Image (spheres, rainbow, N blue to C red):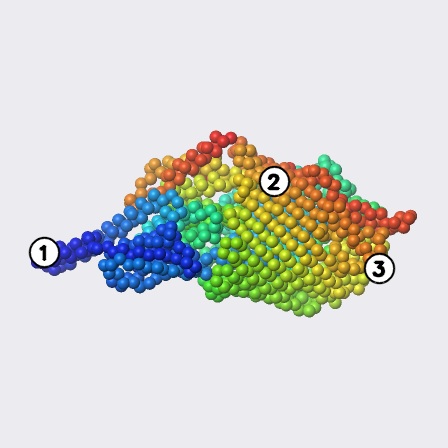
């Protein structure tokens, strides 16, 4: 008897001779759709299975009595239920509930930006910029091929949705860059100071941007520097206008990146004829040092220092300023330093301490008859916190302190003048992101600012909301009030000015699938409190100079106003053509202003009604080459014809603008041992004769007519040839 | 005495039985994994390992293979980047447990690199820094164990997809795959359940490199 008992017990533990029972069922979600591949098992046992293509499952188990069955599937909340297992087959039906926090949900898009790298809207990667023809590696040049941006060829700066270049601000790691463009005088196009390869993200917001940023009536451009590089390496670039060296050194938990560039347009201008008369073509020296450290506690430090020296001299054209022609020289010294420390306060809370410092000094010399020296110093302190309050609520808040000092000294034969001012800004912002279910999200925020030099203190609310359809894209809406201090050239004369203000209303629809993106955005911007000053019609002073040097000290006030409304369309396809990527961008813009010296509401001369770009890039494997093509079109731009009456102010238009640019990159590394790339770029290959506007002569001729001189590009075409080499300092053996 | 003997026998039975069952279940699960060639198969494999890991919560291999299955399956999803990231999150959770149970292990560390590489592949242009981190991890694994053949395979795949002017391309990748091929020949896993994958992948990629050389 005992033996049998022992054997039975033995078998009981060792054998799998029990009766297995079948549990059958179906798994669906809360819409009744079957869930394929769900994980179903009995807790504490080895018995489990996976639901098939119809959501059905068959689970065989030898467990008995009260058991807990558990079901899980990605994107859904885990499901557990107590069941009673006996010897009979049982049927079940389980419903899974979506997990809000985990399911890829809706993201705010309208005009505003999104955090993180899941950016589906207008974000350009560094290689996008470098490979877009017509940009020659300039960030702002690439952005002008995107919707919302107007092509202002003679300037090279960013004009967004009817807003001047000064209405768009650039940030590096959320620290403001006071002077992102190299300084050029009117009608000599400029470019950004920073190479796109310094950054791993470029986010361009055409309006309705976050409460974290202020002092920009139109848009912000957010650049994020790279984190940690993978290797130590040295990059050398040789190009038709200069040389550059960059060295990356990787330590255990830190890295240093140092770059040095020297560019001189003299040899190039001697080869390719220019319309402008250069006495000294632009010479630029540029160096940066970046330092990144990852700390053991999870914190990170990112520091960037950039130093820039830029110098040129040219002969101005007839009818410019007071004399017929004079030599103008501009020397620029620029220092930008920023440092960010990212730290963790707790599991759900992080912070970012930022320090910025800008120094920008410009010396303008006019044929030794006058010298103007401008110096701007701008330190910034910033503190930002990020907290995840719950699954549905995220909070971001912080504040900054800006100190801005502007000092100008004018030294002419007849006059010596000093103008300066200082402005202290204290700002605070808070923004919360709320998620309701998987289809609706909302961002609410506000920014308060106090500027010592203007009134009043401002409060700018920001609201945006987005609704996501299941399979057909998403809809978003954004509204905000944006403030900006008047330009330096006004503030240096008076402290009685107010903040300029713009209200943005933006509606957006976006759909992305299979590497194709479609985006439609409609907007309305209302401007108020813009700086305005009375100027008698047809005063002797040249209007373009008025914009820049401001010889008249007139009564500045904030009575200016304006509007901008329009539509932006964008379509990008990275899939249809193998190894190819193209985008089409169209913008319609209707904008009028009555500001500065304007005599009535008119469209400013920078803006065309229609802007169109087609950008195409193709990698050809067999030829080891990358080809890029950009076609841009803009309808005619308004210009001022003083021969007509004041009611016809800015009523005439230039002919439309066309440009077809090509670039070609050839990968030599298949023939050589080291990675070498040869690069060619030519803008306006078809030689369109573009005219950006007309400038009237300063004085009327014998018949009382002002002659209109066309403002043309420096040269019909721009060519660039470059060679890029990379030497890596580490290899696996 | 007899009672103690009985109890001991019974206890031994339980222990060896459960260990035998663990091995048996693992073997079954590994069979599903080794036969897998589409997304649904890898999901089924991942599910099996998750089921095992909830009952064998001290066995690092259950978490290791769950992580591996989730990672590999993302390569079969072409139209939903967010879903890929969600699966990689699941892979990451499993990696973390495996790492706690088996710290400073080159195979586990390699999984970390595999997850980083997979995240990078989701959106290479906007995740360049993640790609860099993946490479750093592969190098760390090779420092820990220069004979780990899988590290060469994963590193080689990354190099293959890196543009030539940044130091990548088929030619450079082939060098690494060749080093891996030698290591596969001499590799012997500590146990039949220990990671032993990658040879097929290595052969496949080596062939691809050779083909692209001929395409010139």
Q: Which quadrant of the view contains residue A601?
A: bottom right
The x, y position of residue A354, in whole percent, is 57, 59
Q: Secondary structure at mark 3?
A: loop
- Say which residue appears at 73% left-offset and 52% top-offset: A606
Quadrant (top left, top right, bottom left, bottom right) of the N terminus of chain A = bottom left
Quadrant (top left, top right, bottom left, bottom right) of the C terminus of chain A = top left
Work out whether residue A488 can be spotted.
Answer: no
The x, y position of residue A570, in whole percent, is 60, 50
Q: Which chain is mark 2 on?
A: A
Sequence order check: which comes first, mark 1 or mark 2?
Answer: 1
| Residue named by callout 2 | A628
- Cα separation, mark 3 vs mark 2, equals 49 Å
The x, y position of residue A664, in whole percent, is 61, 37
- Say which residue appears at 43% left-offset and 46% top-offset: B76
Packing grade of label 1 (10 A; few <14, some 14-19, many >=20) is few
Sequence order check: which comes first, mark 3 or mark 2?
Answer: 3
Q: Is residue A427 above or below residue A27?
A: below
Q: Which chain is mark 3 on?
A: A
């Amino acid at each position: 008897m005992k033996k049998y008992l022992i054997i039975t017990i033995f078998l009981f533990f060792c054998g799998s001779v029990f009766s297995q029972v079948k549990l059958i069922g179906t798994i669906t979600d809360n819409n009744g759709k079957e869930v394929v591949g769900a994980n179903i098992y009995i807790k504490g046992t080895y018995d489990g299975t996976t639901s098939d293509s119809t959501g059905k499952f068959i689970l065989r188990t030898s467990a008995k009595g009260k058991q807990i069955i558990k079901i899980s599937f990605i994107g859904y909340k885990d499901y557990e239920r107590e069941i009673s297992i006996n010897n009979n087959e049982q049927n079940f039906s389980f419903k899974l509930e979506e997990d809000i926090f985990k399911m890829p949900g809706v993201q705010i898009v309208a005009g505003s930006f999104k955090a993180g790298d899941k950016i589906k809207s207008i974000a350009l990667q560094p290689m996008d910029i470098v490979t877009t023809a017509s940009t020659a590696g300039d960030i702002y040049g690439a952005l002008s091929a995107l919707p919302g941006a107007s092509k202002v060829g003679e300037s090279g700066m960013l004009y967004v949705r009817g807003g001047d270049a000064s209405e768009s601000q650039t940030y590096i790691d959320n620290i403001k860059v006071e002077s992102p463009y190299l300084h050029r005088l009117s009608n000599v196009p400029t470019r950004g100071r920073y190479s796109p390869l310094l950054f791993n993200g470029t986010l361009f917001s055409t309006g309705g941007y976050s409460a974290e940023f202020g002092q920009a009536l139109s848009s912000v451009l957010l650049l994020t520097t790279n984190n940690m590089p993978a290797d130590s390496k040295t990059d050398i670039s040789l190009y038709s206008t200069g040389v550059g060296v960059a060295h990356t050194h990787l330590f255990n938990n830190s890295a240093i990146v140092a770059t040095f560039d020297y560019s001189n347009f003299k040899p190039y201008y001697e080869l390719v004829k220019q319309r402008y008369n250069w006495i000294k073509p632009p010479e630029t020296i540029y160096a940066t040092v970046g330092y990144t450290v990852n700390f053991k506690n999870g914190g990170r430090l990112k520091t960037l220092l950039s130093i820039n020296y830029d110098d040129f001299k040219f002969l101005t054209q007839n009818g410019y300023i007071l004399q017929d022609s004079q030599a103008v020289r501009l020397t620029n010294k620029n220092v930008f330093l920023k440092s960010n420390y990212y730290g963790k306060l707790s599991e759900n809370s992080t912070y970012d301490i930022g320090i910025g410092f800008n120094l920008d000094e410009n010396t303008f010399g006019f044929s030794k008859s006058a010298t103007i020296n401008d110096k701007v110093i701008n330190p910034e302190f910033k503190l930002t916190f990020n907290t995840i309050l719950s699954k549905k609520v995220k909070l971001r808040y912080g504040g900054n302190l800006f100190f801005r000092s502007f000092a100008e000294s004018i030294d002419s034969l007849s006059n010596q003048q000093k103008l300066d001012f200082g402005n202290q800004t204290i700002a605070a912002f808070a923004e919360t992101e709320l998620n309701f279910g998987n289809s609706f999200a909302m961002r609410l925020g506000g920014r308060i600012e106090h500027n010592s030099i203007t009134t009043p203190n401002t409060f700018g609310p920001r609201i945006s909301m987005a609704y996501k359809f299941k399979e057909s894209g998403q809809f978003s809406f954004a509204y905000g009030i944006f403030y900006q201090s008047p330009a330096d050239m006004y503030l240096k004369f008076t402290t009685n000015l107010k903040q300029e203000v713009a209200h943005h209303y933006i509606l957006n629809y976006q759909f992305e699938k299979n590497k194709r993106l479609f985006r439609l955005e409609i907007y309305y911007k209302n401007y108020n409190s813009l700086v305005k000053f009375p100027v008698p019609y047809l005063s002797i002073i040249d209007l373009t100079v008025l914009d820049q040097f401001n010889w008249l000290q007139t009564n500045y006030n904030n009575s200016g106003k304006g509007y901008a409304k329009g539509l932006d369309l964008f379509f990008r396809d990275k899939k249809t053509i193998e190894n190819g990527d193209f985008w089409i961008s169209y913008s319609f813009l209707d904008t009028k202003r009555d500001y500065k010296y304007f005599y009535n509401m008119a469209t400013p001369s920078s803006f065309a009604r229609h802007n169109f770009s087609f950008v195409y890039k193709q990698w050809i494997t067999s030829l080891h080459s990358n080809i890029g093509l950009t076609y841009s079109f803009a309808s005619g731009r308004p210009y001022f014809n003083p021969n007509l009456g004041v009611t016809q102010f800015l009523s005439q238009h230039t002919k439309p603008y066309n440009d077809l640019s090509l670039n070609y990159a050839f990968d030599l590394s298949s023939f050589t041992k080291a990675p070498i790339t040869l690069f060619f770029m030519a803008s306006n290959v078809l030689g369109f004769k573009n005219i950006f506007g007309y400038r009237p002569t300063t004085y009327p001729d014998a018949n009382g007519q002002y002659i209109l001189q066309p403002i043309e590009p420096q040269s019909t075409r721009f060519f660039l040839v470059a060679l890029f080499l990379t030497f890596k300092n580490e290899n696996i053996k | 005495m007899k009672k103690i003997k009985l109890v001991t026998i019974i206890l031994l039975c339980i222990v060896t039985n459960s260990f035998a069952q663990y091995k048996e279940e693992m073997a079954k699960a590994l069979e599903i994994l080794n036969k897998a060639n589409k997304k649904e198969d890898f999901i089924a494999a991942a599910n099996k390992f998750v089921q095992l890991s909830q009952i064998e919560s001290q066995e690092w291999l259950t978490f290791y293979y769950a992580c591996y299955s989730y990672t590999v399956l993302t390569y079969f999803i072409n139209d939903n980047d967010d879903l890929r990231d969600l699966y990689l999150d699941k892979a990451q959770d499993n990696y973390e447990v495996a790492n706690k149970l088996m710290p400073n292990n080159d195979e586990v560390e390699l999984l970390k690199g595999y997850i980083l590489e997979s995240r990078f592949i989701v959106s290479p242009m906007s995740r360049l820094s993640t790609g860099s981190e993946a490479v750093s991890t592969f190098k760390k694994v090779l420092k820990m164990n220069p004979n780990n053949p899988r590290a060469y395979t994963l590193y080689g795949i990354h190099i293959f997809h890196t543009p030539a002017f940044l130091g990548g391309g088929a030619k450079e990748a082939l060098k690494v795959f060749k080093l891996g091929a030698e290591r596969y020949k001499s590799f012997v896993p500590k146990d039949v359940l220990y990671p032993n994958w990658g040879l097929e992948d290595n052969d496949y990629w080596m062939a691809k490199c050779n083909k692209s050389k001929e395409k010139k």
